[in-house]
Every structure is written in C-alpha cells, then in structure tokens.
Amino acid sequence: MRGLAAGLCLLAVSCSKPIAYRANDLPPGIVELHRPIFAGRGTELRGAHQGTTLQMAADFRGPAAIVVQGNDVWLHDFSIDGNRAALEVRQGLPPYDRSFATFTANNGVMAVSREAVEIDRVGFRNIAGFAILASHVAHMRVRRATVEDSGSRNAAGRNNATGGILFEEGSADFSVENCTFRNIFGNALWTHSLYTSPRNQRGVFARNRIDIAGRDAIQIGHATDLTVADNVASHIGFPADAEDLENRAIPVGLDTAGNVENTAYLRNRISEINGKCMDLDGLHDSEIRGNACVNRKPPAAYPLGNYAIVMNDTNPDMRTRNIRIVENRIERPVFGAIFVIGERNLIARNLLLDLNTAQCNQNIAHYQCNYAAADPHILEAGVYLGRGAERSAPARNNIVEYNLITGWGMKTGCVVSAPGIPANWNTVRGNDCR
C-alpha cells in the first residue's frame, strides 16, 4: 500500500504545514480538517488503536472529508464528525440534470467513477451532506458503518434527502451490509440516477438497522437486479414537521423510483411508519416476499399515514406488471393494505391485519376519507384494484388469493374493484375476510 498523501492537520496545527505521520495510519484523537483528505490508488487509511476522529472545521471547503481519487482504496476503523451546525447549507434537491455528486458538498466520503472501494467500521455523525456519496462506482462495499444525526434542510426547514448513504449514476456491484443508521434527516440508504443516466445494478442492501429517518428508510431508484433483505427500520417519517410536503415527498419504509426491475424486497421489518410502508413506483417484474409492516399506535400518531403498499407508474419506460407480493405481514395501516394497478401481479398468502384504523368511511371529515370522489371506496378497502396512477393502467389479469384480511369494514370491503374495473378482469379467490 502506498502512504496517504500529505494533507492532514492536527488540532491547533495549521493545515498550511502538513504533518508527517506513519504511512497509512491516522493519528489518535481529534484531527481537524480544513480541506479534504485525498486517498489515491492503493491507499489503506486506518484509524489509530486509541481512536481517531476526523472533524471537519467550520471553515472546511471541499466535497467531502475524504475524497477517493483512485481505485483499490480501503477505509476502516475511524470516525468522521461533519460539524453540521457550522456546515449545513439550506438547499433543496439538485436540478433534474445534475447529479448529487456535482451539487452536494460537505459529505463524509465521496467516490466518483472509482472501483474496488471498501469502507469498514467507520462512524459518521453530524454530516451536513451524505455520509457516503458514491457516484458511478463499481465493486464498492460498505460494512459495519454507523451513521448518526446527519442530513440538512431546505430553505423551508424541510429535509432535502441528505444524511445517509447514496449510490448514484449507474453504480454497479455494490453492497451495504450490517450498518446502523440513527436519526437521519433525509433518506438513510438509497440509489438514484438521472433519467438520462444508466441504471444502478447488481446491488445488495442487507441486515442494516435504521431508527428514525425523516424521508425514506431505503429507496431503490432507477435500478435493476437489486436485493434488499433482512433490514430492520423503525420510526420512518419523523419528526413530522421536517417532512418535505411542498414536494409531495411522503415518507416510505421501502421506496422505489424510476424504472426498477428484477429486484427483491425480502424479509425486511418496518415499524412505526408515518407514511407508506412500500411505494412501488416504477417497480415491475420483481418480488416482495416475507416482509413485515407494523404500526402500533392510534391513527392520529401518523399524520401522513397512507396505504401500506402502493403501486405507481411515474416512469414512462415501464409498465406495472409481474410483481409478486407474497407472504408479507401488514398490521394497522391508517387506510388499506395494497393498492394494485397494471397486469399479471400476484397478491397471495399475505396477513393483512387490523386494516383501516382511520375507520373510513366512518370518520370521513377527520381523516379525509372522501378525498377521491371518483374512487369513493378506495380508502376503506383492504386490497384495491385501481384504474391507474400517474397514467391509465387498469388492474387486469391479477390474482388476489388466500390472503387473511381483517379490520374495520373488511368483511365486505376486503377486495374492492374501482369503478370501471369489471369483476371478471381479475381473479379473486380463497381470501379470508373478517
């Protein structure tokens, strides 16, 4: 391994006078940064046995505390304090034609167009941008990282999606495993690409724990061949006053965006969701199996509460079809369990329990149960077979079978077809409605 390039400054030592230190080793204690550390090819950067914290100074200038400038880089066993109180920039999302890597500063670690980067046992706290921002990377692994108290706001004081770990712009063959996220203002873990960019592909998000995320716990955006498995998330969409309502960014446990296929959401457990458990916007030819979505409090505790699972089709290049939603457990959503559009989807052997805690259409005024005049029964159904979402996509040739569906009004309203969807367009059989 080559030694780390000069550029570190110890607390109370000017960065204009680079210090000497043993190759690859960070010094113990607090290391104040006024500019980034650049990790070149073949660098191993490790913290001291006694502990090392890289602290971004109030006058820090640069894209990230550590900028990966070469391939084959290994970062491990140290912490980064992003000094969010001093470095937060009140801004919204980047314009439609700019990546986050060209827009968001003051990140923890940034890697752009690099390969074979490994981050292990690194702690991130008080990061104004993203803990890790990986743009068009390949073969990147993040393991046993901790991200706490991170993310910034927009001019209105709402979350601007920052704070967690982001892979964007056609990243491939990446993984985030066994990491912990606490009190993330925006999205905890996600992928994103511009519409004109390649999709992210062949990624794994597994066995991560997320507690308090203001926007989404996990979002899969514009991707193919991803696996999201065995993650545990709680308190999604809190604090409620930080939600980006002006941009209709309803919080989601497992979110989807863009054109996403050949992706699996498996055995994830999500609880206390002030929003949707899963938004399948853009998802097709994929599997949702063995997940649990559970709320335990009265509906008033979730002011942005919604359907548990919602299909959507914003991206023009996809069609909602061939989604298998099987053997999941949904408990106590504010409204129904699953909103279905498109064709050849399977909804089978799910436990859909204690649905419609808002008691639509009993508490009509309080919970806005009658918000859609064209679909008067949409919020009181367990499974709703709709006409479309962003565009016409009538529910046709779907199978809804052998589900246990319980809750307010579910004996008669467990599976409901929207006006204009004939009963014989879909197969509904063997459901236990109570």
Image (cartoon, rainbow, N blue to C red):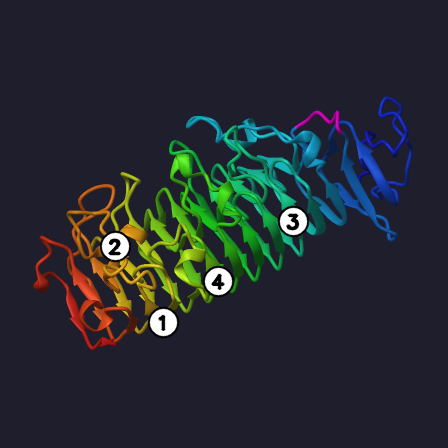
Q: Which residue is mark 3?
A: 147
- Which residue does the image show at 29% across and 61% down from the upper left? 336
Q: Earlier in the sequence, mark 2 or mark 4?
A: 4
Q: Earlier in the sequence, mark 3 or mark 1?
A: 3
Q: Which residue is mark 2?
A: 364
- Which residue does the image show at 86% across and 53% down from the upper left? 49
The vertical placement of 424 against 146, above or below, is below
Q: Which residue is mark 4?
A: 271
Name the kind of residue labelled 1 in the image. Glu
Q: CA distance from mark 2 to mark 4?
A: 26 Å
Q: Badge 2, how many Cα within 10 Å: few under 14, some, many 20+?
A: few
Q: Which residues are magenta?
A: 58-62
Name the kind of residue labelled 2 in the image. Ile
Tags 1 and 2 touching, CB below 8 Å:
no
Q: CA distance from mark 2 to mark 3?
A: 41 Å
Please name which of the two marks, 2 or 3, marks the residue nearer to the observer. Answer: 2
Q: Earlier in the sequence, mark 2 or mark 3?
A: 3
Q: Position of residue 193 (x, y in %)?
A: 44, 37
Badge 2 element: helix
Q: Badge 4, how many Cα within 10 Å: few under 14, some, many 20+?
A: many
Give the quarter of the figure containing the N terminus. top right
Q: Badge 3, how many Cα within 10 Å: few under 14, some, many 20+?
A: many
The vertical placement of 313 against 195, above or below, is below
Q: Position of residue 417 (x, y in %)?
A: 15, 60
Q: CA distance from mark 4 to mark 1?
A: 17 Å
Please name which of the two marks, 3 or 4, marks the residue nearer to the observer. Answer: 4
Please name which of the two marks, 1 or 2, marks the residue nearer to the observer. Answer: 2
Is 127 in front, or is 2? 127
Q: Position of residue 419 (x, y in %)?
A: 11, 54
Q: Which mark is residue 327?
A: 1
